Image (cartoon, coloured by chain):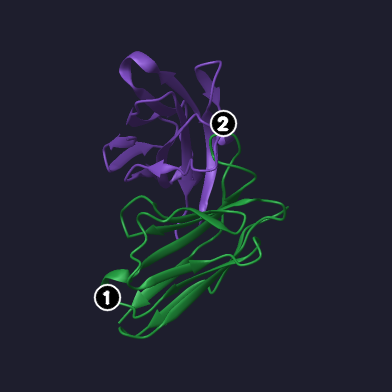
Chain colours: A purple, B green
Amino acid sequence: AQSVTQLGSHVSVSEGALVLLRCNYSSSVPPYLFWYVQYPNQGLQLLLKYTTGATLVKGINGFEAEFKKSETSFHLTKPSAHMSDAAEYFCAVTSASGQAGTALIFGKGTTLSVSS
Amino acid sequence: EAEVAQSPRYKITEKSQAVAFWCDPISGHATLYWYRQILGQGPELLVQFQDESVVDDSQLPKDRFSAERLKGVDSTLKIQPAELGDSAMYLCASSLAGTGVSEAFFGQGTRLTVV
């Protein structure tokens, strides 16, 4: 079975400060890991994903995440927060099987607030 | 740019009534997912289709929920009868194949309120 734990349901930062959103996963098979962003009353948009290869992955809007197998973590970072980054962020995992039955399993989400 | 279309965007219904949601995936996407997102929570899978076949409906409350994708293209999710606890955002997503190999694209969702 797979699961995702997002540490901290709410993170507040100042504009220009470092953003760090934490995600730990549990998986008995090699995982594929994702970060999605959701704005109010909208669907989810993919920020970045890790499948295989380079463990540091870069996504849209200046976000990046590093896959650390030894720590079972996939934390999301951005060097300098912008007001437009305020949103809900979800970490998700799926198995690396490539088969049809590989739906995403999401964490409970972290709300990011950015103050000026 | 291709999008996953969902309708309606918002729905208010009385408990014990029937309600249906529609999803049109991105053209050519064989895999379609319905997720339920309760306020303040992450999305949870209800049902997954590969073409017209159900791949996973283990979390679908089958006594009141049903889903179909008759021609392997668009899909309908139905609730009958609706209960107060069904109030949530219902998200549809599609991908070329399983999300292990291809990105899942999400629609804007249907916000259901049961009164």
Question: Mark 1: which amino acid?
Answer: Leu
Please tell me in which quadrant of the rendered image residue B96 appears.
top right
Question: Mark 2: which amino acid?
Answer: Gly
Judging depth in this view, the residue of B15 and A40 nearest the camera is: B15
Discs 2 and 1 share one subunit: no
In the drawing, what numbered circle is on residue A59? 2
Residue that appears at 67% across and 55% down? B26
Residue that appears at 45% across and 42% down? A104
In the drawing, what numbered circle is on residue B4? none
Judging from the image, mark 1 belongs to the subunit labelled: B
Judging depth in this view, the residue of A15 and B31 nearest the camera is: B31
Residue placed under numbered mark 1 in the picture: B84
Residue B30 percent location from the top left of the image: 64, 51
Judging from the image, mark 2 belongs to the subunit labelled: A
Which secondary structure, mark 2?
Answer: loop
Is A101 above or below relative to B66? above
Which-is-in-front pick, marks 2 and 1? Answer: 1
Residue B58 percent location from the top left of the image: 36, 54
Judging depth in this view, the residue of B20 and A110 nearest the camera is: B20
Residue B99 percent location from the top left of the image: 54, 40
Residue that appears at 37% across and 37% down? A14
